[in-house]
Image (tube, grey):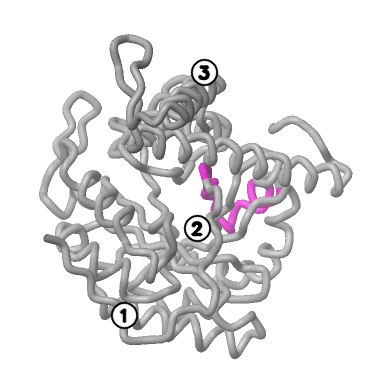
Amino acid sequence: MTHWVLPKFPLKETVMAEFIRRSCLVVSPLDQPAVEEAWAHNPDAIALDLHLLPTEQKSQARARIRDQLAGLGRGGAEAFVSISQAQLYADAEAAVWPGLDGLLISHLDSAEQVREADEVVGEMEKRHGAITGSVEIVVLLGTARAVLNVREIITASPRVTTVGLDESHLLMDLGLLPSPDEDPLEYYARGRIVMEAAGIPAELHGHHGVYRLGLGYPLSSCPNLNATADEVRKAAKDGKELGFNGALCWAPGWVEPCNLGFTPTDEEVAYHQSVRDAYKAAVAMGRGAMAFEGGKFVERPVDELAKKILALRQQCDQRDAEKAAARAAAGADRRPL
């Protein structure tokens, strides 16, 4: 039986509303044209990537972050900065300013490191005039220890809203080589993260649990910047079926396939609406189940799943409308480049 330990600190007065982040486009702050055009690819979020930069380029990149944050939301995208746990203070000092929605932090592998990050972010919010408690933490797990400690990590701070798995780094930590032909992780690490993140009780993060970033194999372990739209969409759909909600996009061409892959299709909506109609009819007749197409039966758990799928599609449509309105307001409603 699973036992949850609630954190010994005050939670936010209001539980954070559910959000839709199917695509988070990662761009280098040193590539100014890419930063300026990132919004045009229609991502739900954009992350300026300090984490992967060579050490000798970090100072130059940090100096740009504050000014670059202001333009990331032009098309309705949320603004994130990807930083390293090893350089937590310096990266957070450069990144935490008004306009930042959250930090992606690699590679946290303990609750103590999360609490340290919480304290540093809180300090920077005060120093730089950001709203207290406004900056989220996205934890990217990249070691076997982190996967083992995932429950403690995602419950260590109310700032932690999202968890992702850096499979390439995890494979390196395990001494394994990524291969597009064979999945060395199979489904254990992904399944554990989804199970733990989705199972968090409402007292911690509301009924939606912690958001999950991940794709299906092989793009999850072997990111291919030249992957076709069909390949990315399939990886996104596979990720959605595993229980993930969105993904980091390492190339602009990944954005729209991820938006589509993590959004319930019209066919799925029609099917789940028919499920709901069948269950309502069963309840009206005083029955707990109803025969359905293909020899299936519709009962309450199936109806609850249908509710979630229909609600997700509604949220995705609303998010797309918000972004379209933002582009129109900016006077630049145009196709992704």
At label 2, the amino acid type is Asp
Q: Is residue 219 visible?
A: no
The disc placed on residue 267 is: 3
Mark 1 or mark 2: name the one nearer the start of the chain: 1
Above-or-below relation of 303 to 157: above
State the residue at coordinates (41%, 26%): 282
The answer to whether residue 80 is left or right of residue 337 is left
State the residue at coordinates (21%, 37%): 178
Q: Residues within 10 Å of mark 1 (few under 14, many from 20)?
A: some
State the residue at coordinates (53%, 20%): 270
Asked if the stretch drawn in magenta spans residue 32, the answer is yes
Most foreground residue, 37 or 325: 325
Task: Give percent across and percent down for residue 216.
Answer: 32, 33
Kindly identify which residue carries mark 2: 49
Mark 3 or mark 1: name the one nearer the start of the chain: 1
Which quadrant of the rendered structure holds the N terminus?
A: bottom left
State the residue at coordinates (54%, 40%): 311
Kindly identify which residue carries mark 1: 7
> Which callout, 1 or 2, points to the residue nearer the camera?
1
Which quadrant of the rendered structure holds the C terminus?
A: top right
At label 1, the amino acid type is Pro
Residue bounds of the magenta highlight: 22-36
- Whole-Å distance between the Cαs marked 3 and 1? 41 Å
Q: Secondary structure at mark 2?
A: strand
